[in-house]
Amino acid sequence: MPAHETIAAIATPPGTGGIGIVRLSGSRALAIAEALSHSSLVPVKIQFRRFFDAGEQVIDHGLCLFFKAPHSFSGEDCVEIQAHGGPIVLDMLLERVCGLGARLARAGEFSERAFLNGKVDLTQAEAIADLIESGSRAASRAAMRSLEGRFSQQVHDLDDDIVNLRTYIEAALDFAEEEIDFLNDIDIGRRLDEATVKLQALLEQAEQGRTLQEGLSVSLAGLPNAGKSSLLNYLAGYEAAIVTEIAGTTRDVLREHISLRGVPIRINDTAGLSESQNPVEREGIRRAWESIGQADVVIYLVDAGKGMTGEDRRILDDLAAANLQLVYSKSDLLAESEAPDPAGLYISTRADRGMDKLVDSITGHISDYNQDNHTFMARRRHVDALQRALECLRQAAHGFEQSRSGELMAEDLRQAQHDLNEITGEFSSDDLLGRIFSSFCIGK
């Protein structure tokens, strides 16, 4: 990124609105804004100005705000031009500032400059995008906590613990000829255990934050005509899937994004799990199993009017129990004399029976994120990095117990620190930064 380049972009969404914003950042931002307005600007003062094109015709009039480096979002000289929100007006303003020496900003380039100039770390930069794109109040609050640095602070605290432990171990290696065996110090094992417990807790919080960022993935599974599509329609609030008495109507995975108890949900209606020689149905069943394997929660539906079949039991044996909820659909067809299965929930979308209990089961404690002041937003890459760091700590602890090998412990701790630094950006490849910031919207 050439430091001398001044970038510009429309920072408000496409379309017509009362106000539209053109944002500039870079060493020539002030000069360009003053040329545009034929006037001088002073820092941190809202000033009413007219904006002129190259032919001295007035494009529009509105407000100018100048933020002098380093006291701006990006850490550079920044100007925000607030004009009327018509797309033609904003395009004319953007064309003019580019004619005066700015260039069009890439997606996420303002946030990238804020990161490179030390205004935010990488998790805070990502939290900006997550806050903009949050699909629920819980997600919005969690993103704001990350933007305020709560996630970063926990990572830094853990990193400090590992650095201190590395320092002690590497000092012991440097003075290996001394009579005192520092590596037999039981305090090392205790500190490793404490760091491991702290990292496990942080990983659990990050998993929760990832769920809010990505949405809880829920797959509906079962035999053909078990009521999966009816349940999808009920939860979505409209006829998202075709429902007929004919088995096998759904042949592909239908996906809907909804919100339950303030938690974003990605719900997948899958093809009926059965044996078939039809190549289209076989592909649908393959995709159904793929969706089931990737889901956070699997709801397996059994037609209550028919009861549990041998085929149902065979399929249930192949499903992971940890994330499985057994549900008997069409409970309005259940004979009164038939004893209910204590392991399952009984629902009826037609009679609106048992649906609150099912929603409670899907969201579980995640619905409490709205009241949890500790949940922060996280992404899958954060979770992956924490998992790698945790494995390194476990290897270091195992090495300490088995061999007291200082060299191996020091290397495991160094790698754990490296993995943590990937999260906040102390260590980040250019490719990683490119992938992250290219996912941001233009003008942010």
Image (spheres, rainbow, N blue to C red):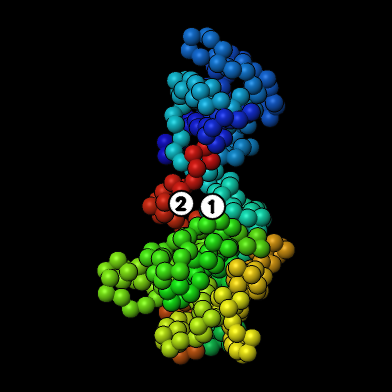
Residue visible at 54% across and 81% down in the picture? 305
Residue visible at 51% across and 23% down in the picture? 88
Classify mark 2: residues with Cα within 10 Å, few (<14), some (14-19) or many (20+): some
Residue 369 on image: x %, y %:
67, 64
| Disc assigned to residue 214 | none
Q: Is residue 426 above or below residue 384?
A: above
The amino acid type of the residue labelled 1 equals Glu
- Nearer-the-camera pick, 278 or 202: 278
Q: Is residue 394 above or below residue 418?
A: below
Residue visible at 44% across and 38% down in the picture? 106
Work out how far the residue at label 2 is from the one at label 1, CA to CA, in angstroms: 8 Å
Classify mark 1: residues with Cα within 10 Å, few (<14), some (14-19) or many (20+): many
Residue 439 on image: x %, y %:
46, 48
Mark earlier in primary sequence (2, 1): 1
Q: Which residue is mark 2?
A: 436
Q: Quadrant of the N terminus?
A: top left
Residue visible at 55% across and 81% down in the picture? 304
Residue 264 on image: x %, y %:
58, 60
- Nearer-the-camera pick, 188 or 111: 111
Element type at mark 2: helix
Q: Which residue is mark 1?
A: 126
Residue 192 on image: x %, y %:
56, 80
The amino acid type of the residue labelled 2 equals Ile
- Nearer-the-camera pick, 170 or 149: 149
- Nearer-the-camera pick, 19 or 125: 19
- Whether residue 150 is visible here, answered yes or no, is no
Q: Quadrant of residue 277?
A: bottom left
- Whether residue 85 is visible here, answered yes or no, is yes
Element type at mark 1: helix
Marks 1 and 2: in contact by CB < 8 Å?
yes
